[in-house]
Image (spheres, rainbow, N blue to C red):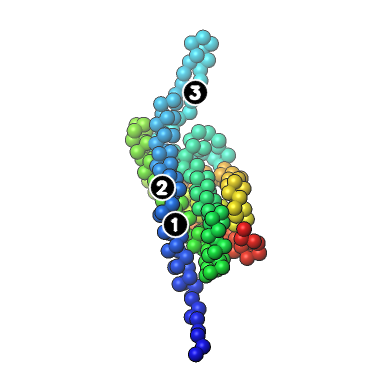
Amino acid sequence: MEMQFKKQSFEKRLTSMLKVDFKRLFLSPLVYILCGISLVLPILILVMTSMMGGTSVDPTTGVETTVETFTNVWQAIGSTGSAMSMDLTSMCNINLMFFLVAIFVCIFVGDDFRSGYAKNLFTVRAKKVDYVLSKTIVCFIGAVAMFLLYFIGAMIGGAIAGLSFSTEGFGAGGVIACFISKIFISLIFVSIAIIFSTVAKQKLWLSILCSLGAGMLLFTMIPMIAPLSAGILNVIMCIAGGMIFAIGLGALSNLILNKTSLV
């Protein structure tokens, strides 16, 4: 009697891969450490800058020194300045999370190659396209969690520092649109980190270095793409951009995995 093996559909393969990746995500100490950093970071930034900010005068020379500080809590979420603004509030805000997301993705994906899990996985069942798509979805969910925790931390830090919660000049809708836009911009950073992780494989330092370098090229554009005065057009543009990058770079990551050695 001839045995016949039923071919698994794409949906079943992807569902199986997602279950494995989500299990690894929730069991990884790395995720909880980075989520803790995401929560604590804005609290430290807002409280410390509020304590150290202001103008001081040197009694011996009479020279005034001004340390810039946040004037309201929403500056920790977005900037009202120009794309090339390099002041404290545009540098030390939620945009720092994009680099933390890149590091998270590089470690999460790179661990598959260092442990030999990826080689065994592709040998037994999974296809490269399933792997890349699953990693993109799971890492994006991890990035969303980190951004949400940063937002909560910013609210806590702002309350402790006594900062204003006024939305004068941009409105509550602008804050929401800005935050949603940045969440979808993180999909671009996730896709970039995945492609460098597939190139570097076991060389974690190389994937992190390349991902952070590529991220720096986009960093100064983020305040312009998703300012505090953002609207529905910014949200649509960021969703579309994130999806286009995820599909395009995902296809390139799949090609790299198919054309290169897994060790």
Q: Are marks 3 and 2 in contact (CB under 8 Å)?
A: no
Q: Residues within 10 Å of mark 3 (few under 14, many from 20)?
A: few
Of tags 1 and 2, the one toward the viewer is: 1
Q: Position of residue 159 (x, y in %)?
A: 33, 35
Of tags 3 and 2, the one toward the viewer is: 2
Label 3, label 2: how far apart the Cα atoms are? 37 Å
Q: In front here: 108 or 48?
A: 108
Up-down relation of residue 236 to residue 70 (above or below): below
Up-down relation of residue 261 to residue 173 (above or below): below
Q: Which residue is mark 3?
A: 66
Of tags 3 and 1, the one toward the viewer is: 1
Q: Which residue is mark 2?
A: 32
Q: Position of residue 234 (x, y in %)?
A: 49, 52
Q: Residues within 10 Å of mark 1 (few under 14, many from 20)?
A: some
Element at badge 3? strand
In the picture as drawn, the residue positioned furthest to the front comes out as 1
In the picture as drawn, the residue positioned furthest to the bottom comes out as 1
Residue, x 43% and y 41% (percent of image)?
Answer: 37
Q: Position of residue 168 (x, y in %)?
A: 39, 39
On the picture, is 83 further left or further right than 71?
right
Q: Earlier in the sequence, mark 1 or mark 2?
A: 1
Q: Position of residue 214 (x, y in %)?
A: 61, 48
Q: In front here: 125 or 62?
A: 125
Q: Earlier in the sequence, mark 3 or mark 1?
A: 1
Residue, x 62% and y 58% (percent of image)?
Answer: 263
Q: Earlier in the sequence, mark 3 or mark 2?
A: 2
Amino acid type at mark 2: Tyr
Is residue 26 at all visible to an observer of this figure? Answer: yes
Q: Which residue is mark 1?
A: 24
Element at badge 1? helix
